[in-house]
Amino acid sequence: MSNIPVTIPYFTDDEAKAVEKALASGWVAQGPMVAKFEEAIAGHEGIGYGVATTSCTSALHLAMVAKGLKAGMDAIVPAFTFVATANAVVETGATPIFVDIYRETFNINIENLEDILKNQYEKKGDSYINKKTGNTLWGIVPVHEFGLCCNINKVNELAKQYQIQVVEDAACALGAMVSGTHQGAFGNPSCVSFHPRKSITTGEGGMVLTDDAALAKRMKELRTHGSTVSADARHQGKGFLLPEFNEAGYNYRMTDIQGAIGLEQVKKLDYIIEEKIKRAALYNELIKAQLPELITPMVPEGYFHTYQSYVCMLDIEKLGLTSIKEGGEFRNILLQRLEDKGIATRQGTHAVHMLGYYRNTYGYVPEDYPNAYACDHLSITLPLYIQMSDEEQRLVVQTMREEIDAM
Ligand SMILES: Cc1ncc(COP(=O)(O)O)c(C=O)c1O
């Protein structure tokens, strides 16, 4: 029986020592370590400012609020993403409008996006109004899924044409690039995650990256209850009065214990990505040779994929299956059989329009977004982490081969 998890974070003694130091300093809430971590991440991605938060979900919410998203507005969100992308929109009081994806890249489908912009909205004054609900179109939340950027240049072009906002969900995409430009530097606020399934981790945690100094300042205020003085500055100072609060904000602060871990993790980021790229190449090779029923991840020309996750699709035609539903049933049995052999896998992510809250609130049916539905049923995330050996990867592919043959 093997014991291969879907991922394992990569820590050395450095993180433990950094935590000890943070504890010994007596400063465990947000402070100097978080500020240094923000600088380090922003520096790595080639961007002006980082605003650390408790998670990518809170980072998304913070960026959306700071960019004016609120009740009575629509935000366009890919239908195949982790539910947090849409939940952050709902949290602002606005309505998520789903758009389908490409099966090959799992990212936002530009033709479908153009179609929604053109047909579901009409121009009134300076705004685009939803013809059915009367909501104002606020903008787009493209997702860079599994470590591969979406066609952000096209998204930006459309946003410019329609004069709408873009907040990027880069939860999985720290370090990803298009034509040598890092995510975060595409001209929009971009939100990354430091959850343990991501390339580097602080346990939980997130960050908004932006080049806009005023936006960074506003988000820093909003993450500290709307305070005009940062928690750090207030504790450093000797004043006894609380500062002014001009807005109703949140507590989205990362702790200095997490900041200290993050500062060590960011030093390992390039190495982790490099190693994951090598492991992804080995999977590509093994699958090509042994598993023609699997479609390996696609990397369009000019895109730098960081393989936060290595996600394949089942090829139902090659399996002789006739429907997505049948393919989904096959996939689930296969993944269960792998789990029984000690090999953990996951579905890639889910089709959000098919989840209870979204189905029940907005009345969606699976076929509304056929590619998201297909990826929900047919995607498979294989185990991938840098401590993994070639032999373990060979075992994953060999076991899949054996189980498919036995089904
Ligand atoms: C695309 C996407 N967006 C948002 C999130 C939420 O990130 P966090 O867990 O840091 O809130 C995730 C997490 O898996 C994600 O994959």
Image (cartoon, grey):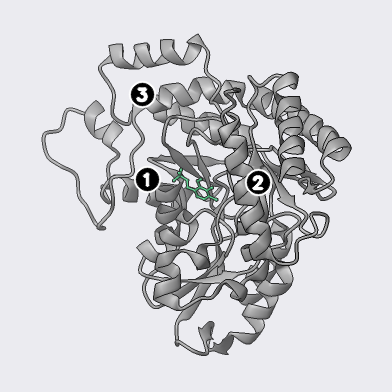
Judging by the rendered image, the residue that carries numbered circle 1 is: 220
- Quadrant in which residue 351 is drawn: bottom right
Q: Earlier in the sequence, mark 2 or mark 1?
A: 1
Above or below residue 106? Residue 5 is above
How much space separates mark 2 and mark 1, taking CA atoms? 38 Å
For the residue marked with disc 1, what is the amino acid? Answer: Lys
Identify the residue at image location x=76%, y=56%.
104
The image's mark for residue 103 is none
Residues at marks 3 and 1 touching, judged by CB atoms closer than 8 Å: no
How much space separates mark 3 and mark 2, taking CA atoms? 34 Å
Within 10 Å of disc 3 (Cα), the crowding (few <14, some 14-19, many 20+) is: many
The image's mark for residue 257 is 3
How much space separates mark 3 and mark 1, taking CA atoms? 19 Å
Q: Nearer the viewer, mark 2 or mark 1?
A: 2
Q: Is residue 17 left or right of residue 328?
A: left
For the residue marked with disc 2, what is the amino acid? Answer: Ile
